[in-house]
Image (cartoon, rainbow, N blue to C red):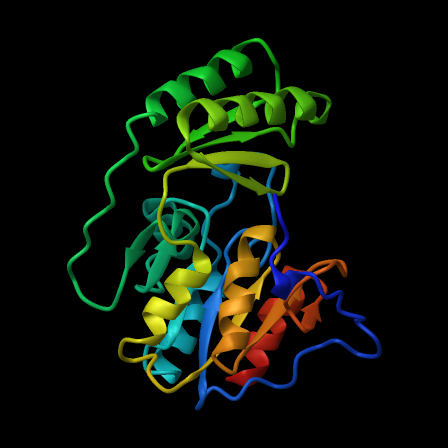
């Protein structure tokens, strides 16, 4: 897979890469969930609500007149469960399933090849302890965090299925996912930025994974910036925070 021009430039991370104090009056926040607002867990179901996080997000939504969105790889129902409904604007499944400010929400149709993919993932997981399959409705994910020795087999199966079905490969932290065509996190950010209450704001993206890179690029193209969470790596983000606790503390300091 070719690397986009925006991601071919390595950030030096020289000096203090921490983002400046957030100006809530002019900003629009686009926040990843796992690895950004919540610590990564070996099993997706192990991540649950957190009183501090939910209260912080509700305060930010109120203070910023709704200019807060979640950009997550999780299904919409899981985002709502973990964040206790604190943020209404969500781009779930890496941007495939969007819910904006209005009350209406129409999930995208599932690709016809997804049942085949899910069945193949489950067949491999049945013979490999530690592999976990996540059916997201419009995508299927194979988690190998608990079975790192199965990384090669998981990736080989996903690549073979992608070639057979035409579904797109979506790599992540110790997970490989197959998804149908549609918007990514960057597309979703641009979409939200064209609608109230995000119009005219400066987009700030906070995320940790490769799936957040399109959103980092989109934010920069609109005059904003990306904040990478975790160790330094090649990224379109230009600022960095060490971990989830650092993200929460940075957001709390702005209130």
Residue at left offset 33%, top offset 83%:
199
Residue 146 shows up from this direction: yes
Between residue 7 and residue 41, name the one nearer to us: 7
The furthest residue to the right: 15
List x then y, in percent, for residue 164: 45, 22
Residue at left offset 37%, top offset 49%:
81
Looking at the image, residue 64 sits to the left or right of residue 151; the answer is left
List x then y, in percent, for residue 83: 41, 56
The furthest residue to the left: 104
Q: How many numbered callouts?
A: 0
Residue 37 shows up from this direction: no
Where residue 41 sits, quadrant-wise, is top right
The furthest residue to the top: 127
Q: Is residue 47 above or below residue 99?
A: above
Q: Is residue 172 above or below residue 50?
A: above
Quadrant location of the N terminus in the rendered image: top right
List x then y, in percent, for residue 133: 48, 26
Looking at the image, residue 91 sits to the left or right of residue 41; the answer is left
Residue at left offset 46%, top offset 68%:
30
Residue at left offset 38%, top offset 62%:
188
Between residue 120 and residue 168, name the one nearer to us: 168
């Amino acid at each position: 897979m070719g690397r986009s021009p925006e991601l071919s430039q390595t950030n030096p991370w020289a000096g203090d890469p921490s983002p400046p104090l957030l100006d809530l009056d002019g900003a629009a926040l686009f926040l990843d969930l796992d690895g950004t607002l919540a610590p990564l867990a070996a099993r997706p179901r192990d991540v649950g609500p957190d009183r501090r996080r939910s209260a912080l997000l509700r305060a930010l939504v109120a203070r910023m007149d709704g200019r807060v969105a979640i950009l997550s790889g999780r299904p919409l129902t899981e985002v709502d469960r973990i964040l206790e409904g604190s943020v209404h604007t969500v781009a779930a499944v890496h941007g495939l399933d969007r819910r904006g400010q209005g009350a209406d929400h129409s999930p995208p149709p599932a690709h016809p090849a997804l049942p085949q993919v899910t069945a193949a993932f489950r067949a491999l997981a049945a013979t490999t302890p530690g592999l976990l399959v996540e059916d997201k409705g419009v995508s299927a994910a194979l988690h190998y965090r608990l079975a790192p020795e199965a990384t090669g087999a998981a990736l080989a199966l996903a690549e073979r299925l992608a070639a057979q079905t035409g579904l797109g490969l979506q790599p992540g932290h110790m997970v490989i996912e197959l998804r149908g065509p549609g918007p990514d996190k960057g597309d979703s950010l641009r979409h939200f930025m064209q609608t109230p209450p995000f119009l005219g704001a400066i987009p700030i993206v906070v995320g940790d994974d490769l799936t957040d890179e399109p959103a980092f690029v989109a934010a920069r193209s609109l005059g904003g910036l990306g904040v990478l969470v975790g160790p330094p790596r090649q990224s379109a983000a230009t600022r960095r925070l060490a971990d989830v606790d650092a993200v929460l503390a940075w957001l709390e300091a702005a209130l």
